[in-house]
Image (cartoon, helix red, strand yellow):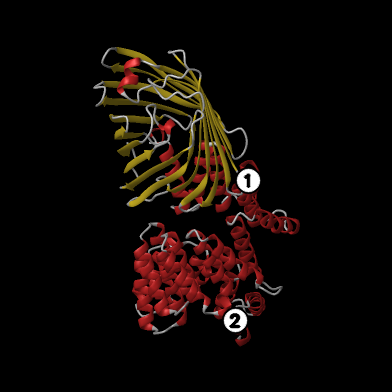
């Protein structure tokens, strides 16, 4: 039977099956032939048939240890790990020095994810058979499994320890290095990930895999040009005889890098060619969906993600990609559903968990408080306390309210005034792209010559008419309250307003604001503000542009408030932001705007202007943040009183719960 043994040892299970089947026709009681035939069919994809054969053998040779071992292995082939655990534990009690029983028991424990005990018993097996390659290979995969388990639990240091232990056993092992690099990516240790991929790159066989990883590291670090250059190097090195899996991975990364760099036409050409060759491949459909996400063609993305999920219900890209597209379209419940579907297939997956966490933040009730001090060169001073709260009751419906207190005085006129504003409101998402917001309240003012109460209101619709566009239209009733003199005059402003913003896929944007105002002092105002800007960087956000402002009043009452017949101002500005929304806990966020330009009041000569706005804050946790802020400007329209206006203050924001009230 030597020929048959050779087939088994070399993995030629088809030939082994045929060989021993022929022997059994002549010698049906031959124990060795039955054992070998059982192993052949078990290893050749027929585990249930093998289990029945070994059950019969065990009945015939109940005291034969070799038969017992093979019966136990048939339990593993059938993935009956709980029963296998009990069975092999009995075998190592029977023979504590049986290498095969110890190794099989260790592998069973590993399959049950009981890694501590699995490692303990594989080490005992290695004491029985030092340096045994099968045991060492098993130990390698136990370390990989244990590290992955710790990674899922976000115990990154422990996971790293296990992977480094593996590298002591198998120096520069590809599987271990890839798992280690992935761990560093997930835990945002980008420099360590880069170093790990560079070690992997030392082996020419791993060059493409390493370059694909390095491109991803550059992307996560915000170095998109480096990502594209690295990926192009890998893509250009592809040959006809390159492993198909590596070809796919490298092509996929190169197209992603083109998309990251907004080279959409180049990416589209490659995707179109791939679609012609393989019109229903998930990885190609995912690339097209990603391209459309970046182009804000979210409906097209959803179509591709739906096809991906039709092909494979458990697709990670399909489920989480659809969640992102649904969120962008304003279908928040469907976004939740798709993200949660991801977690049913990928337990504790970090990207899906973070997506739900970020979406939860959007709908979690919060309180926000501000305290500020303002002054100008007209000798006006003011202290202000602002309190607001928002309480979403669903993904469509929110309640909110605010209370503001302001006291102001003028050291020249000796005028003093205070105001108390109280308002409540709601917002409701009428359609996925239209949201109504309304507030109503009162202001109570006490001034030198008059005490009064007035109605306040703000009613608006936020609309996304087309992709990359947003429009706000509304009506707002307010009181001119900048200083004590204005509060004393009880000037009510009624405003019709519109804000319109257009973004593009080539970093250019245009924002326009218009106010039409009529007042109870029989005056009226038209205000137009427009800004053309260019996004230079995305992380942190850096943009620069040109602003233009035009104001005209029906009546000129300069002794009371700034009200020119015509006012023009233009400026250039630079804006740097690290957004608090993307800032991680225990990190700082900031914003700085600097602008300079010229203003023209009536027909007077031009005057130079400047404007500086700054914010510096710290996110203490997922639920709590605070920041300082300040503004200084000499633009005449910045205040009702005139030039040189300064404001400094502090802000605090606290999320009242860990997640939305309606998801508790």
Image quarter of residue 630: top left
Residue pointed to by mark 2: 10
Q: Nearer the viewer, mark 1 or mark 2?
A: 1
In this rendering, the answer to whether 522 lies above or below 21 is: above
Q: Position of residue 435 (x, y in %)?
A: 52, 28
Pick the front one: 81 or 204: 204
In this rendering, the answer to whether 179 lies above or below 126 is: above
Image quarter of residue 373: top left
Q: Position of residue 144 (x, y in %)?
A: 44, 68
Disc 1 is placed on an element classified as helix
Disc 2 is placed on an element classified as loop
Give whichever of discs 1 and 2 has the lower sequence position.
Answer: 2
Q: Position of residue 316 (x, y in %)?
A: 55, 53
| Residue in the picture at 39% in, 45% down | 580
**Residue 305 shows in the view:** yes
| Residue in the picture at 61% in, 64% down | 249
Residue pointed to by mark 1: 301
| Residue in the picture at 54% in, 65% down | 226
Q: Is residue 311 left or right of residue 81?
A: right
Cα distance between the residues tagged 1 and 2: 48 Å
Pointer 1: residues within 10 angstroms few (<14), some, or many (20+)? many
In this rendering, the answer to whether 328 lies above or below 53 is: above
């Amino acid at each position: 039977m030597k020929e048959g043994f050779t087939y088994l040892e070399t993995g030629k299970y088809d030939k082994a099956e045929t060989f021993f089947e022929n022997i059994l026709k002549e010698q049906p009681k031959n124990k060795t032939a039955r054992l070998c035939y059982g192993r052949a069919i078990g290893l050749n994809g027929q585990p249930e048939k093998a289990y029945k054969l070994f059950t019969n053998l065990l009945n015939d040779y109940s005291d034969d240890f070799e038969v017992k071992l093979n019966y136990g292995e048939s339990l593993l082939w059938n993935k009956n790990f709980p029963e296998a655990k009990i069975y092999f534990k009995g075998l190592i009690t029977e023979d504590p020095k049986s290498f095969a029983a110890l190794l099989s028991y260790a592998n069973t424990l590993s399959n049950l994810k009981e890694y501590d005990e699995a490692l303990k018993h594989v080490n005992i097996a290695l004491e029985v058979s030092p340096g045994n390659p099968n045991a060492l290979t098993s130990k390698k995969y136990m370390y990989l499994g244990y590290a992955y388990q710790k990674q899922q639990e976000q115990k990154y240091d422990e996971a790293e320890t296990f992977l480094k232990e593996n590298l002591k056993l198998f120096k520069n092992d590809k599987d271990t290095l890839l798992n280690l690099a992935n761990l560093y990516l997930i835990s945002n240790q980008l420099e360590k990930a880069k170093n790990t991929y560079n070690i992997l790159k030392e082996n020419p066989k791993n060059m493409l895999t390493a370059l694909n990883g390095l491109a991803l590291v550059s992307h996560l670090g915000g170095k998109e040009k480096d990502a594209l250059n690295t990926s192009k190097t890998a893509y250009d090195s592809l040959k006809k005889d390159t492993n198909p899996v590596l070809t796919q991975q490298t092509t996929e990364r190169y197209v992603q890098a083109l998309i990251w760099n907004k080279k959409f036409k180049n990416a589209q050409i490659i995707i179109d060619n791939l679609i012609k060759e393989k019109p229903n491949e998930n990885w190609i459909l995912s690339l097209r969906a990603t391209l459309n996400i970046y182009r804000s063609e979210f409906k097209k993305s959803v179509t591709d993600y739906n096809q991906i999920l039709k092909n494979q219900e458990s697709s990670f890209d399909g489920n989480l990609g659809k969640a992102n597209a649904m969120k962008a379209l304003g279908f928040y419940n469907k976004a939740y559903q798709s993200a949660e579907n991801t977690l049913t297939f990928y337990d504790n997956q970090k990207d899906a968990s973070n997506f739900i966490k970020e979406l939860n933040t959007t709908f979690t009730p919060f309180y926000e408080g501000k305290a500020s001090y303002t002054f100008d060169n007209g000798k006006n001073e003011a202290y202000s306390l602002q309190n607001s709260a928002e309480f979403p009751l669903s993904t469509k419906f929110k309640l909110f309210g605010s209370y503001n207190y302001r006291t102001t005085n003028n050291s020249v006129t000796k005028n003093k005034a205070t105001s108390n504003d109280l308002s409540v409101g709601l917002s409701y998402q009428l359609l996925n792209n239209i949201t109504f917001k309304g507030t109503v309240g009162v202001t109570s003012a006490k001034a030198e010559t008059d005490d009064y109460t007035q109605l306040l209101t703000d009613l608006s619709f936020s609309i996304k008419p087309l992709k990359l566009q947003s429009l706000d239209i509304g009506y707002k009733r307010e009181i001119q309250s900048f200083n004590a003199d204005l509060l004393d005059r009880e000037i009510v402003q009624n405003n019709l307003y519109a804000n319109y913003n257009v973004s593009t896929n080539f970093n250019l944007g245009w924002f326009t604001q218009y106010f039409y105002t009529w007042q109870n002092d029989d005056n009226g105002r038209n205000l137009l503000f427009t800004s053309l800007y260019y996004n230079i960087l995305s992380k942190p956000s850096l943009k620069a542009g040109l602003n233009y402002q035009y104001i005209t009043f029906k009546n000129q009452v300069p002794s009371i408030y700034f009200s020119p017949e015509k006012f023009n101002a233009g400026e250039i500005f630079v804006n740097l932001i690290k957004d608090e929304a993307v800032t991680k806990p225990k990190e700082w966020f900031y914003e700085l705007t600097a602008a300079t330009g010229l203003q023209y009041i009536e027909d007077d000569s031009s005057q130079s202007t400047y404007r500086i706005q700054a914010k510096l804050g710290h996110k203490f946790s997922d639920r709590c943040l605070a920041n300082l802020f300040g503004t200084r400007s000499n633009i005449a329209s910045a205040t009702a009183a005139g030039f040189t206006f300064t404001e400094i203050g502090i802000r605090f924001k606290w999320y009242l719960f860990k997640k939305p009230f309606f998801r508790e």
